[in-house]
Image (cartoon, grey):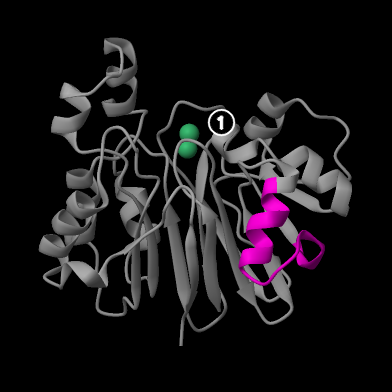
Amino acid sequence: MRFALLGSGSRGNATLIEQGDTLIMLDCGFSCRETERRMLRLGRSPADLSAVIVTHEHGDHVRGVPALARRYDLPVWMTHGTARRLRDDDLPAVHHFDGQDVFEIGDLQVRPFTVPHDAGEPCQVTFNNGQHRLGVLTDTGRITPHIRACLDASDALLLECNHDSGMLADGPYPAALKQRVGGPLGHLSNVQAAGLARQLDTSRLQHIIAAHLSDKNNAPHLARTVLAEALDCEPDWIGIAHQDDGLDWRELA
Ligand SMILES: [Zn+2]
Ligand SMILES: [Zn+2]
């Protein structure tokens, strides 16, 4: 199993997970053309995709989904609540799931889990190939016991480090937006992400990637430092998923 990111942050998110002939895209917050361009960079085309899974209906996660699904005839998986908010009756094939379901797409087992975030029915996802598990967690306002249980003992983690609380407080956002981002239905701070990392069994961990960093309220070195401290590792070992450059393929072996 391997994974890569087309980009990560408030201006667009998309993650690829590949196992054998199965290639899944998790969220697509980029236009169809931009998605094609970014996939090419990773040696792939949307024509290679088996399915798209949508975590929630915010624009930075769904912007490109309808056009991409129609152009490449892709099945889209999402919760009932996300589908209701997306309001698109013209997708080629929609599969609904809820936060308790476990399902298979090709060679990958997909386990969604619910998260507290200000969307219709938001979820995040773990991917399992029978040997290794990749856990993805972005767009959550706080850590719940359920999130902890789902991500414990993962082999790879893609973990939201949205903001540094000090930078958010002193930054350019209007007060209401600061409250939303930092609130219990908003986004994880570096310290919250590190708090989760501290509580998890990380004995199997091969990769940890800081994701969904705010370009106004965070900086890669801050996320790296806080996570490295929590995991007692070198800061360079912490990967960063960038808004423009995403993240190159990472292999689980
Ligand atoms: Zn987001
Ligand atoms: Zn969101």
The residue drawn where x is 26% and y is 34% is 217
Q: Position of residue 157 (x, y in %)?
A: 38, 64
Tell me, yes or no, whether the highlighted magenta stretch contains residue 49. yes
Q: Residue at x 56, y 27 (%)?
A: 120
Looking at this view, is 47 or 93 the one in front? Answer: 47
For numbered disc 1, what is the local secondary structure? loop
State yes or no: residue 176 in magenta: no
Seen from the viewer's position, the closer of residues 236 and 151 is: 236
Image x and y of residue 82, in percent: 64, 33
Residue 96 in view, yes or no: no
Quarter residue 111 falls in? bottom right
Residue visible at 28% across and 18% down? Answer: 179
Instruction: Locate residue 50, reporting x and y percent.
Output: 77, 64
The residue positioned 68% from the left and 64% from the top of the image is 40
Residue 171 appears in the figure: yes
Most distant residue in the bottom direction: 253
Which quadrant holds residue 175?
top left
- Which residue was labeled with disc 1? 58
Q: Quadrant of the N terminus?
A: bottom right
| Up-down relation of residue 28 to residue 24 (above or below) | above
Range drawn in magenta = 34-50
Report whether the residue tagged 1 is closer than 8 Å to ligand 2. yes
| Amino acid at pointer 1 | His
From this view, report whether residue 32 is shown above or below residue 119: below
